[in-house]
Amino acid sequence: MIRGIYSTALVKLALKNGIFEIVSPTESQKRRFGISDSSDIPDINIGDAKDRHSVKIIGDVEKIAEFVEAVRRVDDSVLTWWKNNVENKGALCILSFPMQAKGTMDMLRSEVTYTVPYHHYCRAGSEGLSLMVSLAENLVDSGVAEAGRVSEMFADEVKRLTPRIGSTVRIYHTKLSGRNIQLSPGKVIWRREGEVKILRRIIGNGVYDGLGIPKSIGDTAVMHVERGKPYTVTRYYSINNTLKGEYYNICTPVEVYDTYIRYVDLGVDVVKPADGEPRIIDIDELEQGLNNGVISRPQYEKALEIANEILNSLSKR
């Protein structure tokens, strides 16, 4: 049984795979796929997770694994976290869709019905963006507007979606352990289409992780993010604006919305003290993510490739 904002794409995937049957279909699922009513008890239930950037899959562990494997065959960028014995209903798997995977879900959905570019990116992003998707697609479905023109205009609008100068931005940072962290919010000090620099003031003592450089009163951090880029850059400055060090966080492609940004931290990072040599750190976190099945082998290899590219670039400066 499949519900939620990814349902059309996932039903299409399930039926294309040929080994899954949809039970208790919604009216739109019956209409779009020609599915008959079935009141059979589902082996797995799929629905939106709270953050809408993921789905929760509850049920038989083997059937869940089979479904996850089917998803990964069409897009190996999805991430998975497993838990057992959820409310005595079997296993629970959180299947997370980074930006690339949302695009794959768009393509699957477009095989069934008209789908604007960035459909799932916007559906997951906010209620306002979700309503914008519904309006655009309804205009095409009703024959009021031409699909090609609407797609072009919609894509242009999403590309311009960027926090305003001076606005406060939330930063959602998910670890490969599945832990969700909301970093202290920052202020936008620079922007262009899909790209921002966010100023955050450092509070507390200690040292900067990875860099080993002491924190001091008055320090600031400037985080530079760009939509779709597979890493973020944070530069730390002293109270007199002297650069102390740089931190490159390898992650899933950054998703930039009007009030927040989000990504999944892939563990491996590149650091460079202002007066030192760059180096790669925390490869063990990336390896653990692979060993635990959270990320795929191609995703693991891509993260290492990006880290080495950054290291080489910094070494030549």
Image: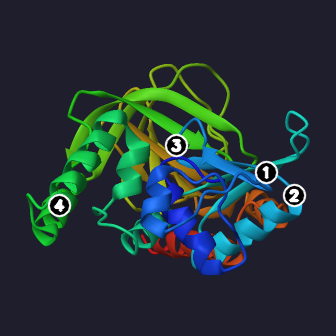
Compare residues 256 and 249 and report the one nearer the observer.
256
Please tell me whether mark 1 sits on a helix, a strand or a loop: loop
- Badge 2 amino acid: Val
Image location (x, y in percent) of residue 20: 70, 70
Per the image, the residue denoted by label 1 is: 41
**Image coloring type:** rainbow
Per the image, the residue denoted by label 3 is: 52
User: Of the residues under marks 2 and 1, which one precedes in the sequence?
Assistant: 1
User: Of the residues under marks 4 and 2, which one precedes in the sequence?
Assistant: 2
Per the image, the residue denoted by label 4 is: 140
Where the C terminus falls, by quadrant? Answer: bottom left
What is the CA distance from the residue labelled 3 to the residue labelled 4? 25 Å
Image location (x, y in percent) of residue 246: 50, 50
Asked if residue 3 is positioned above or below residue 110 in the image, the reply reads above
Q: Which of marks 2 and 1 is in front?
A: 1
Q: Few, some or many C-alpha atoms within 10 Å of disc 2 (few <14, some 14-19, many ≥20)?
A: many
- Badge 4 amino acid: Val
Per the image, the residue denoted by label 2 is: 61
Does residue 19 appear anywhere in the picture?
Answer: yes
Please tell me whether mark 2 sits on a helix, a strand or a loop: helix
What is the CA distance from the residue labelled 3 to the residue labelled 2? 22 Å
Does residue 193 appear anywhere in the picture?
Answer: no
Q: Few, some or many C-alpha atoms within 10 Å of disc 4 (few <14, some 14-19, many ≥20)?
A: some
User: Of the residues under marks 1 and 3, which one precedes in the sequence?
Assistant: 1
- Badge 1 amino acid: Ile
